[in-house]
Image: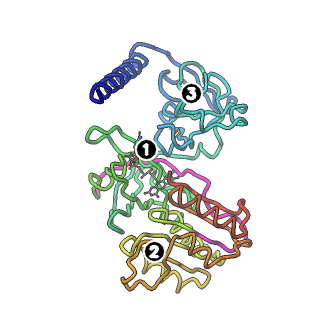
Amino acid sequence: MLLQIAISVGFLLACGLVLAGLLLLAEKKILNYGTCHIDINAGRKGLDVDGGSSLLSSLAQQDIFIPSACGGRGSCAYCKLKVNAGGGMIGPVEEPYLSADERKDNVRLACQVKVRKDLAVEIPEELFSVRRFRARLAHKRPLTHDIVELRLELLEPDAISFEAGQYVQLESPEYKGHDSVMRAYSISSVPSDTHAVELIVRLVPDGICTTWVFEHLKEGDPVALSGPYGFFHLADTQAPIICIAGGSGMAPIWSIVRDMKEKGVARPTTYFFGALTQRDLFFMDEFKKLEQDCPWFHFVPALSKEPEDSGWTGERGLITEVVSRHFPDASKHEAYLCGSPGMIDASIKTLVQNGMPEANVFYDKFS
Ligand SMILES: Cc1cc2nc3c(=O)[nH]c(=O)nc-3n(C[C@H](O)[C@H](O)[C@H](O)COP(=O)(O)OP(=O)(O)OC[C@H]3O[C@@H](n4cnc5c(N)ncnc54)[C@H](O)[C@@H]3O)c2cc1C
Ligand code: FES
C-alpha cells in the first residue's frame, strides 16, 4: 500500500516537473516578445532588449548590475526595484518579500519580473557605478579547514573604488552540470588596495559557488565579478563600537578595522569573533599586532564548543553571552554585525536588551 502511494506521488511529481520544463521551453522557444524598451528613471536612460528574460538579467546584459545575492533564485530580496509600468502581476515567489507599502510603490523583485513588453523602472543612482570586472586569481590560501582567502587581481577595469564593508558578486562558471551562478562575498581588503579585491570564503557543503572555489578554482585562473554593492559601512559618528562576527563574517570587519587604522579613526572598538573550536580561528597573530599598534582596538575571540581540557584560556560560550558579560550596558555604543542570519538576529536581541537603540545596529546577513 505504502509502495503504491509512493509510486503515485513520484509519478505526479515527475509529470509536474515535465510540464514545468515544457512550459519554460515553450516560453523560451515559441513565444517571441520581440524587442522591448526599458525606460530607466523617467528618461535618464533607455534600453532596447530582447524580450523573454528576467529584468535582472536583461539589465545585467546592458552592464547595469542590480544586487542579486541569491543569483536570481528569488530568496534574498536584494534585487528590489520600482517597476512603474509593464511589470505584470506580482508572482508567488515575490509575495512574501513585499510589504503593503512596497506594493503600493510598485516595488518588485527584478529577478522575478519577466520582460514581455515595454517597462518603466526606477534604479537607485549609486547602482550606475557598479562595474563588471575581469580578474585573475593571484593567490588562494587556506585560513582554516573550511575557509580560504582569495586575492583577485583586477585586470579590466584594473581598479575599484569601494567603502570598507561593501561586497562584490563573484560569478562561478558552468562546471560539472551546474549553471554559472552569482554569489555575494564581502571585500576583506582595504579600499586603499585599489588594484585587487580580497575575499574570505567559507565552504558550504554542496554549495555551487563555494565548491567551485574550493575544488576547481586555481591560482592564475580568470575570474569575473561585479561590484561594489551594499550599504554596510562605518557610520559617520563618534560612538564607541562593538563588532560581532563569526566564520567568514570576518571579511567586512577585517576591512573596516584596518581602514580605520589607515585613516586614523581611533574610536574605541571591541571586536567579538565567534567560533566553535580553536581550529576555526584565524588571523590571531594579525589581531595581536593590530591591538599593539592601535590602543583603541580590542579583539575578543570566543569559542562555543572547545573541549574543557584543551588549555584554551580565552572566552568560552555563545557569542551573545560573551558580549553581555563585557557590555551589560551597551546604550552608548554602535554595533556592526556580520555572519549567519541566526547569529545576527540573536546578537541584535542581546544588544537591544542591553540598552542599544536598534537604529545603532548595522549588519550584513550572509543569507
Ligand atoms: C551580502 C552578503 C555577503 C556575503 N559575504 C560572504 C563572505 O564574505 N564569505 C562567505 O563565505 N559567504 C558570504 N556570503 C554568502 C554567499 O553569498 C553564499 O550564499 C555562500 O557562499 C553559498 O553559496 P554557494 O553557491 O556555495 O551555495 P548555494 O549553491 O547557494 O547553496 C547553499 C545551500 O543551500 C542549499 N541549496 C541550494 N539550492 C537550493 C534550493 N533550490 N533549495 C534548497 N536548498 C538549496 C545547498 O545544498 C547548500 O547547502 C554573503 C552573502 C551575502 C548576502
Ligand atoms: S536576486 Fe535574490 S531575490 Fe532576486
Looking at the picture, which amino acid does disc 3 mark? Gly
Picture colour scheme: rainbow
Looking at the picture, which amino acid does disc 1 mark? Met
Would residue 158 appear left or right of 328 to someone viewing this image? left
Does the magenta run of residues contain 33? no
Query: Which dot, 2 or 3, sits closer to the camera?
Result: 2
Give the magenta part as a residue range: 220-243
Which label belongs to residue 309?
none
Ligand 2 within 8 angstroms of badge 1 C-beta: no
* Image spot of residue 58 (x, y percent): 50, 30
Looking at the rendered structure, the secondary structure element under dot 2 is strand
Quadrant containing the N terminus in the rendered view: top left
Does the magenta run of residues contain 241? yes
- Counting residues from the start of the chain, the first of labels 3 and 1 encountered is 3
Q: Which residue is mark 2?
A: 303
Identify the residue at image location x=48%, y=43%.
70
| Dots 3, 1 in contact, CB < 8 A | no
Looking at the picture, which amino acid does disc 2 mark? Leu
| Dots 1, 2 in contact, CB < 8 A | no
